[in-house]
Image: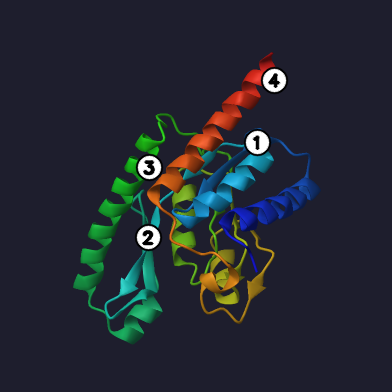
Amino acid sequence: MFRNRQHAGFLLARHVLRVISQEQQLDPSQFIVVGLPRGGVSVALEIARSLNSPLDLLVSKKIGAPDQPELAIGAVTSDGIVTLNHELIRVLGIAKLYIESQKEFLISKTRAFEEHWLNSAGIKERPSMRNRRVIIVDDGIATGMTAVAAAQSARQRGAGEVIVTTPVMSNSAYVLLKKECDQIIAPNVLFDFAAIGQFYLDFDQVEDEEVIRALRQAREERLHKQDVAVT
């Protein structure tokens, strides 16, 4: 049980650093840490700090079933990536028209959110993912659809390696994501998984300001470390 997202991020950062350090000599310049808003950005901040790597975000939103909005039948990202659970769509008999309308609406929404958060944090230049090791972070992964879409976006942006990490995830999501990324770092992969919130004492909604503050903090801390290194 995690106290909150910051606590989960602190513990996960230690785990990620331990796993990565075992593979080879650690080179922070290889990595970009990417948080999935909103909750994943708070967790990602701790990992970016631990690795001394840049923090970015990638907005991915699930496509909910018509009468069950919490049931993900797919997901989209701000890059226009769309991933669908075709078997679930077939079983539920969901119309193509519904999916198309949701895709257009959600892609527009993810782009607007991403632009707002980056602009509000004063971030004008973003780190390139090309040939970098991209660590995608969320506060928990239930169905895996938004993480799959994010992994596909990272590939589209030229990532050399895609790593997905989270404090807790369902076994079904783990199986799904194994096909989409190079590595999964998750200390807790569980069969008995009802909702992400069950693993947190405090799982309140993350507000916009918290996302913006995390992006600012990561940027300012890296600039400070660079200044200290130069002097």
Q: Earlier in the sequence, mark 2 or mark 4?
A: 2
Identified by mark 4, the residue type is Ala
- What secondary structure is marked by label 3? helix
State how far apart marks 1 and 2 are (Cα).
Answer: 28 Å
Asked if residue 199 is positioned above or below residue 183 in the image, the reply reads below
State how far apart marks 2 and 3 are (Cα).
Answer: 15 Å
Residue that mark 1 sits on? 52
Residue that mark 3 sits on? 117
Residue that mark 4 sits on? 229
Q: Earlier in the sequence, mark 1 or mark 4?
A: 1
| Pair 2/3: label in front | 3
Identified by mark 2, the residue type is Lys
- What secondary structure is marked by label 2? strand
- What secondary structure is marked by label 1? loop
State how far apart marks 3 and 1 are (Cα).
Answer: 21 Å
Identified by mark 3, the residue type is Trp
Q: Residue at x 36, y 36 (%)?
A: 120
Q: Position of residue 133 (x, y in %)?
A: 60, 44
Q: Nearer the viewer, residue 7 or 91?
A: 7
The C terminus sits in image quarter: top right
Residue that mark 2 sits on? 61
How has the structure been colored for display?
Answer: rainbow
Q: Earlier in the sequence, mark 3 or mark 4?
A: 3
Are the residues tagged 2 and 3 within 8 Å (C-beta)?
no
- What secondary structure is marked by label 4? helix
Left of 169 or right of it: where is 229?
Answer: right
Asked if residue 160 is positioned above or below residue 89 in the image, the reply reads above
Regarding residue 135, the answer to whether it shows in the image is no
The image shows a total of numbered marks equal to: 4
Left of 108 or right of it: where is 186?
Answer: right
| Pair 2/4: label in front | 4
